[in-house]
Amino acid sequence: MRPFIEIEDLEYAYPLEGGDQIVALRGVNLTIERGEFVALIGPNGSGKSTLAKHLNALLLPTAGRVCIDGLQTSDPGNVGTIRQKVGMVFQNPDNQIVATTVEEDVAFGPENMGIPPEEIRRRVDSALVAVGLSAYRQHPPQMLSGGQKQLVAIAGALATRPSCIVFDEPTSMLDPVGRRQVLNTIRWLNTAEGITILLITHSMSEAAIAQRVLVMEAGRLVMDGAPALVFGQGTRLRALGLDLPPIVDIAQRLRTWGLSLPQTVLTVQDMVDALC
């Protein structure tokens, strides 16, 4: 079976006035399998969001190609289908809220796809159950907490029945409670629903929960591997201006003091299990 996402020699340059340009992506090669949970990290300006916008044809390659489930994004006839396959949830949920009640907001995407009303109702009900907001269906989204607003945005993406959801720093504006709600939902979407996840984040602790971590720097993909492999290269990550997840840093310090801990210690629960 072919990978769900295939990127070959991708380059992208933002045009500037006067004919100049800023090169944001340089020779990116990447495949992501259906059902994977992948985290994408890197310093500011490394090209993370630019890469993400290529996955549902918000941006088109300057050179190279991007294929989603076998469909090239550069073919105008594929754009509608690709955007149904790949949903996006952005940093600020307020920028995605378009309706006066939660259920109307979740229904917005399917309505624009021309889905019959009966099916829209089923999809809205299912999406609200999935994110735990059924009791809030008649609430104005503006009256919800930041975490709940982000869950509304996730429900809106779910209602379009995507195969993949790209999350572009979805927790950066949330408090710890909201962050936990959103991350738990993202994990559930991957493990229970089989949805392919690409999570862009500045939080190394969030990246550690993924199956695979990608690291970008200056428009290039410079690291790619399991979290234990990537975060085991602390010197290289720090050279890129990135930190280690706090638990990984603690584990490394404990090893230097003679405590034997496996390299797979990435989360608080991993540390508890290892110490016990």
Image: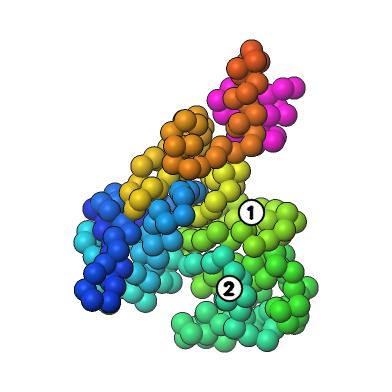
Badge 1: residue crowd in 10 Å (few <14, some 14–19, many ≥20)? some
Horizontally, residue 122 falls left or right of residue 198, namely: right
Q: Residue at x 75, y 73 (%)?
A: 144
Magenta span includes 274: yes
User: As displayed, is residue 97 above or below residue 258?
Assistant: below
Residue 234 rendering spot, x and y as whole percentages = 50, 31
Q: Nearer the viewer, residue 189 or 14?
A: 14
Q: Which residues are magenta?
A: 262-276
Who is closer to the viewer here, 206 or 15? 15
Q: Residue at x 61, y 79 (%)?
A: 97
Left or right of 115: which side holds 74? left
* Residue 269, x across and y down, in percent: 70, 34
Q: Which residue is mark 1?
A: 183
| Residue occupied by mark 2 | 156
Alpha-carbon distance for marks 1 and 2? 16 Å
Q: Nearer the viewer, residue 160 or 253?
A: 253
Q: Residue 1: percent from the left, percent from the top?
A: 32, 49
Residue at 22% x, 59% y: name it: 64
Displayed quadrant of residue 139:
bottom right
- Residue 192 seen in render: no
Q: Given contact means CB atoms under 8 Å apart, are the residues at marks 1 and 2 in contact? A: no
The residue positioned 35% from the left and 55% from the top of the image is: 5
**In which quadrant is the C terminus drawn?**
top right
